[in-house]
Amino acid sequence: MTSPLPQASTILASLDQAAFAWDIATDAIVWSDHVGAVFPDIPAAALASGAELAKLIEPVRSIRSDALLDSLPVRGGALYRIEYGVRTTISAPVLWIEESGCWFAGADGKPTRAQGIVRINNERHARDQQLLRLSRHDPLTGELNRTHLVATLAESMEEAARFRASFAFMLIGIDHLARINDAFGFDVADAVISEVATRIRARLRNGDVLGRFSGNKFGLILKNCTVDDINIAAERFLAGIRDDVVPTKSGPVSVTVSIGAISVPRYARSADEAVNRAQETLDMAKRRRVGSFSLWRPNVERDAQRRVNIRVTDEIVTALNERRIAMAFEPVVDAFSRETAFHECLVRMERDDGQVLLAPDIVPVAEKLGLIRLVDHRVLELVVAELAGAPSVELSLNISPDTTMDPDWWASIESLMRAHPGVAERLIVEITETVAIQDIDGLRGFVTRLKNFGSRIAIDDFGAGYTSFRNLRKLGVDIVKIDGAFVQNIARSHDDRAFVQTLIDLARRLEIKTVAEWVQDDESAAMLRDWGCDYIQGRLIGLASSERPWGTPTEAVLPAAS
């Protein structure tokens, strides 16, 4: 077999490529004249036959022969392209070779000869490996990313089931990372994350797996780990991060982590279940005390509560769909004349069996399960319908914390106000004090828009939190509803009397109206009147009722659901 033409050989040499012709029947390979320059580290004897070359090939020695058999023949031959590594000695680096060729069939249709071009392609292989690594690993820490961490967790569960073994899955969360972001900037926070990953990695055993689960969380798979081992390992991780400050370009930063863990497969039947339960225990650890460890264990009460949550969720959604969300109206009267000033609207839900659930039964669960926005949307429609149907009525509506910043709720109220002129001026929106103190500036925009429509703003349960009267002025609050926990005992408690009287006096000086909740008796009502309280509400005046004192049927003016 003759060598390629000198001209072709020269061109290939300039491209660091070599041509070959492979007689498959004899297994002899003939190369272009400059092959030694292209592959200086590969002995000539190894290039002389397919079998000798295969001895140096990684990872699959038969890759060249397999390529001929796996390619589809076309007009007596077939094209193929493969990549493989060649290592001349155990200690030598791998040369990555890209081979493109064409084989030709004999009378029996099987390959008899092949010819093609090869070249060293270490750079491309390194680039491909880097891309593969980036697809599997977190770029900041170099550890597995979430996708591959969870995939490894699933594989570990299959392996544990097969060999009747156990392991631990941990979630390690960096405490107060958002504060570090705010105080020092994201670059310092990134340095903290990287250092935490390094410290965790340094305390792992061979075979353990570490991955970045989310922005401030790492996931760990600790093989062959008993419950006792889990506790020891968790303390080792906590101390390793807690005991030494993290050096950053902005100075040393003190960092702690909290840990939630679960024993697998004993308490988790799938990767998702293991992750969810580890997250649950991590949340428990943080609630109890940051920088602590919690291990998941079965809990009958917790599981029962979850079943209740699922049932109540279904009931609330069904009630919303079937228009079984209704309202009750509790009177708020003038402290001096005892004439009704307005009514507070309280949510009610009728169950399938006819039983009626009150607001304390509905609102906390709806808030916890993320359904309160839907409930508040429906109650808003009902309140506006009542106001539109009864032009002389004034109503107050208490909205949940999440709803105050919900753009959809604001869009609904804006639409309903424009559709029913004159309603806004007779609507009072109550915001709980705990909401008011969380984001004064953000809430101020919400309040301003409502007041521009003509509505009034009340702060509910005032005194239960720490809102200052300065913030009330900043918000432009019209009414303060004094928390009933302080009002109900003013006839018997000197401390409660002093507190309530002081609130009323301050509010009056700021020209803010006051409502005393939970008024139980005439003696308390008289005190409140004498102190200058504007309105009273509670058992003495009358409890909430589903009957409308103004007798207007809501259905006649009910707006369409949003």
Image (cartoon, rainbow, N blue to C red):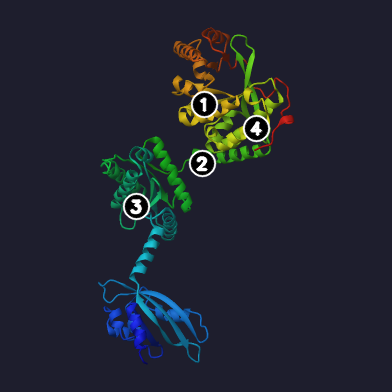
Label 2 with label 4: CB-CB less than 8 Å: no
The structure residue drawn at horizontal position 65% and vertical position 31%, both measured from the top left corner, is 418
* Mark carried by residue 141: 3
Cα separation, mark 4 vs mark 1, equals 23 Å
| Number of other residues with Cα within 10 Å of mark 2, as a class: few under 14, some 14 to 19, many 20 or more | few
Relative horizontal placement of residue 537, taking residue 195 as reference (left or right): right
User: Which residue is more in the foreground, 117 or 308?
Assistant: 117
Disc with the residue nearer the chain's start (2 vs 4): 2
Amino acid type at image mark 4: Leu
Nearest to viewer (mark 2 / mark 1) = 1
Write down the residue under mark 4. Answer: 416
Cα separation, mark 2 vs mark 4, equals 41 Å
* Mark carried by residue 441: none
Cα separation, mark 3 vs mark 4, equals 51 Å
Nearest to viewer (mark 3 / mark 4) = 4
| Number of other residues with Cα within 10 Å of mark 3, as a class: few under 14, some 14 to 19, many 20 or more | some
Write down the residue under mark 2. Answer: 303
Cα separation, mark 3 vs mark 1, equals 43 Å
Relative horizontal placement of residue 359, taking residue 123 as reference (left or right): right
Amino acid type at image mark 1: Thr
